[in-house]
Amino acid sequence: MSKNHEIQKEIQIGIIGYGTVGSGVVEVLEKNNDEIARRTGYQVKIKTVARRNWTGFDCKKLNFHCTENPREIVDDPEISVVLELIGGEEPARSLIIQAMKNSKHIITANKALIAECGEELFQIAKEQGVSLSYEAAVAGGIPVIKVLREAMSGNKIDRVAGIINGTCNFILSEMQEKKADFQEVLHQAQELGYAEADPSFDIDGIDAAHKLTILASLAFGVPLQFSKVLVEGIRNISAEDIENAAELGFVIRHLGIARRRENGIELRTHPTLINEDAMLARVSGVMNAVQIEGNAVGKTLYYGSGAGKLPTASAVVADLIDTIRDLDDDRASRIAPLGYSEIAYDTLSKHNELSPLAPDEFKSAFYLRLGVKDEVGTLAQITKILADNDISIASILQKTELDTDGIVPLIILTDPVIEKNMNLAVAAIENLPQTVGKLQKIRVGKF
Ligand code: NDP
Ligand code: HSE
């Protein structure tokens, strides 16, 4: 007999999606059933699981009903909580809306959906008096949503900066440590199940931008504004940049950054040079880490598995436990979904200190790499252009090796500069007759 025979209450749930995350959730719920019952006072029963195709499964041997029609879950009056683990916008959005209209609480791991349709979904959840939870949507197994929404709520948040795409981090750190080629490592990341179904979501920075959109709303109490995020991926990071960065005492990581400035907020995802002694610089492979800086606590860092079957399931199941704990409360959810009872919607219509800044107003230090002809006066012309645009140079490295055409690589590190100035300077430098090809520019972060 179960140790929990005294627990009388039962809650029935339905799971839509039985892929990496869905199957992980079933495994965790089965493995930790007794512990969850002790924590919540409820026995969780998985009533139905939906996927597109159950061919190859012996459904009679599974402890739940299998269906290929998610509406069986969404419309089932016995099911109180629906877990949406299929991903993408549709049909996930419509299924969630229908389930909420049928008074079901929702748990999702779908960052794309929350980042792009969260405002609409949270509004419907409020109207229906149900909860919509999404801990697994950012940084997989790291409970960073809870940290921002609850544990850090005594702070005014200054900056959130994170390695929030495991695939990008895996690729960049393998390129650095094993001197491996980009395409080869990407292929490995896909085989290991880290990359999204469409890997361009990862390597072009879109997945990180979805997550950053959510983190920024939680940090600053602003609407979800995916369209305001500067999105840059890692396709153009070469082995040469990684080597140069190492020579200068940096590593390159893909970061999502939400930063408060005096005149607005910066929302950006891009490759970044990080000083090698920073905590974030030590995060390798598919791991994620998020640094949150508050005006009372200072810097805090959260590290762990940002993807994968069981780590992601850990976050989904924690949301389920929270949902169950709130069941006997009149309120659908104790805490507003984005952590603020008043979201600063005015930032959408008029500019104030929480409005997203345009990317050319961002401020950052830069690493510049360019090929120049080894001629008298080249460096003087380049430094003049930088000075004319109010850009201060932190250091310069001119490589000694000339290639066969007499081109020499020049690396410049700048002090922090407004991006508008940097863009003007880059255009002018690229126009110089002594400059060959496009200039590579990567932002440098201080952590
Ligand atoms: P998978 O592709 O592994 O699984 C998706 C599942 O959804 C499959 O079982 C698929 O069925 C099912 N499915 C898709 N469309 C439908 C549909 N229309 N009706 C019924 N079932 C459907 O994805 P993941 O498990 O990796 O990801 C799920 C969600 O979790 C996504 O939002 C993802 O971004 C998020 N996430 C994933 C992480 C990870 O590490 N994988 C980490 C954090 C979040 P079938 O197999 O039959 O086609
Ligand atoms: N593709 C995502 C990543 C999965 O690489 O981080 C976790 O969200």
Image (cartoon, rainbow, N blue to C red):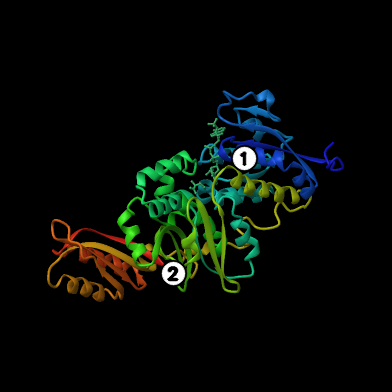
Q: Is residue 27 visible?
A: yes
For residue 334, above or below residue 76? below
Can I make out residue 221 in this image? Answer: no
- Residue shown at the point (71%, 40%) measured from the top left: 31
Q: How many marks?
A: 2
Disc sitting over residue 446 in the figure: 2
Left-right relation of 49 to 257: right
| Left or right of 371 in this view: 227 | right
Residue 267 occupies quadrant: bottom left
Indicate the secondary structure of the residue bearing disc 2.
loop
Which residue is pictured at 64% across the width and 23% down the height? 58
Q: Position of residue 338 (x, y in %)?
A: 60, 57
Classify mark 1 as within 8 Å of ligand 1 or not, answering yes or no. Answer: yes
Residue 41 % position (x, y):
80, 47
Q: Is residue 111 above or below residue 261?
A: above
- Work out which quarter of the rendered image holds the N terminus and state it: top right
Q: Report which quarter residue 412 is drawn in.
A: bottom left
How far, Cα to Cα, is label 2 from label 1? Answer: 37 Å
Q: How many residues crowd around disc 2 within 10 Å: few (fewer than 14), some, or many (20 or more)?
A: few
- Residue 201: image x %, image y %? 43, 46
Q: Residue 261 or 183: which is nearer the viewer?
A: 183
Q: Which residue is mark 1?
A: 24
Nearer to the camera, 107 or 46:
46
User: Residue, x 35% and y 63% (percent of image)?
Assistant: 245
Whole-percent x and y of residue 63?
71, 30
- Residue 387 against residue 115 in the figure, above or below: below
294 vs 195, nearest the viewer: 195
The residue positioned 43% from the left and 51% from the top of the image is: 168
